[in-house]
Amino acid sequence: MKRLKIVFSTIILATLILGLFFRAGGTDKKYESTEFLFDTYCTITAYSKNAETAVSAAFDEIARIHRLTNFFDENSDISRINKAKANEPIKVDPIVIEILETALEMDRESEGAFDVTLAPVSMLWKFDEGEPVPPTAEQIKTALAIVENGGIEVDAESLTVTKLSDETKLDLGGIAKGYAGDAAAKVLREMGAKAAIVDLGGNISCIGENPNSKDGKWRIGLQKPFAPTGEYSETVEINEASVVTSGTYQRYFEYGGEQYHHIIDPSTGQPSRHEFDSVTVVGGSSMQADCLATAVYVLGREKGAALAGKYGVDIYFN
Ligand code: ADP
Ligand code: MG
């Protein structure tokens, strides 16, 4: 039996509001809004006098980042790179340069566990098709060779990206949403939001103090993998920070009694297999936490913990 299941990660993590009264002053208004971006439901809640304007500006910024990085939009910067020939410098938005520089650093630091040039392989795993079938060993081998022989050069001065092989393709699925979380938080702060929570389908960024809790802390429930939505395995208590989860239960299909999910181990071209089903990273930068969640998943407990230690973030396996 083949079955496709996509559970939007928005509904995977949720805030637990335990406080009883508001800390924010009487002039601070709460405003909350949800939009569908990055293939998921994104919710922003902000507390400030002009909360509505701030949230709307934050969504504009998220939409702009999505347009630039969307693999499926043929006019995005990423698609322009993907369609380009080798040695042809492609001029891109500074945002794309910033994301790719972090991606390359993560690739180095994780010894290749996080790899944004993995698209030729990840494209073989067609999670969005009605009845997906795993690719053959031959297809994976060919795609892995493209990844190994390719790569990109990023020039921050000329704002260009150059592919090393015609076939090289980028997939920012493991980092762009994280960048958008940081960018939205920055807009909200600039527009005077004293407190806010940005939830981009499981990438959560908390700003300021939680006005609904006595101690000002935010409490984020970590969804128990494959359990009904809202059933948490634990709750993390944080001040200003990002909480990002990469889980197998978010996007997978079943074929021949096996589950195939969307976090790919670049050393095999296959979904990364472990005894845990999700990794949550808590750290200061949402972009960093996003990459690290994927990288730690691929690396597993021991090597993953070493990488997390290098970046000073907390990790949770579920
Ligand atoms: P999401 O938050 O959308 O569920 P994750 O942050 O968990 O996504 O990252 C998974 C996505 O990242 C995949 O859908 C794919 O686009 C991409 N990806 C998969 N494996 C890797 C990898 N090893 N390195 C970098 N990106 C990856
Ligand atoms: Mg990720």
Image (cartoon, grey):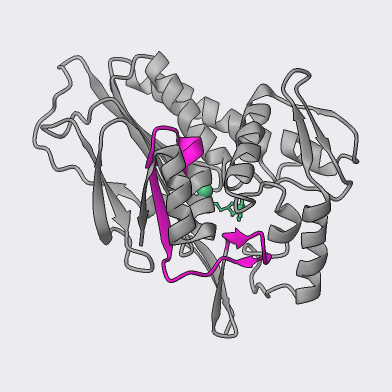
Q: Quadrant of the C terminus?
A: bottom left
Q: Residue at x 31, y 30 (%)?
A: 240
Q: Residue at x 73, y 64 (%)?
A: 124
Which residue is nearer to you in this view: 295 or 80?
A: 295
119 relative to 275 in the view: left or right: right
Residue 36: x and y in percent read 50, 43
Residue 88: x and y in percent read 90, 33
From this view, report whether residue 135 is shown above or below residue 12: below
Which residue is nearer to you in this view: 271 or 111?
A: 111
Q: Which of the 4 image quadrants contains residue 92?
A: top right
From this view, report whether residue 275 is shown above or below residue 49: below
Which residue is nearer to you in this view: 174 or 157?
A: 157
Residue 312: x and y in percent read 40, 38
124 relative to 254 in the view: left or right: right
From this view, report whether residue 296 is shown above or below residue 197: below
Magenta residues, start to end: 262-289
Residue 182: x and y in percent read 47, 30
Q: Residue at x 14, y 43 (%)?
A: 18
Which residue is nearer to you in this view: 93 or 264?
A: 264
Q: Residue at x 82, y 56 (%)?
A: 146
Q: Is residue 40 visible?
A: no
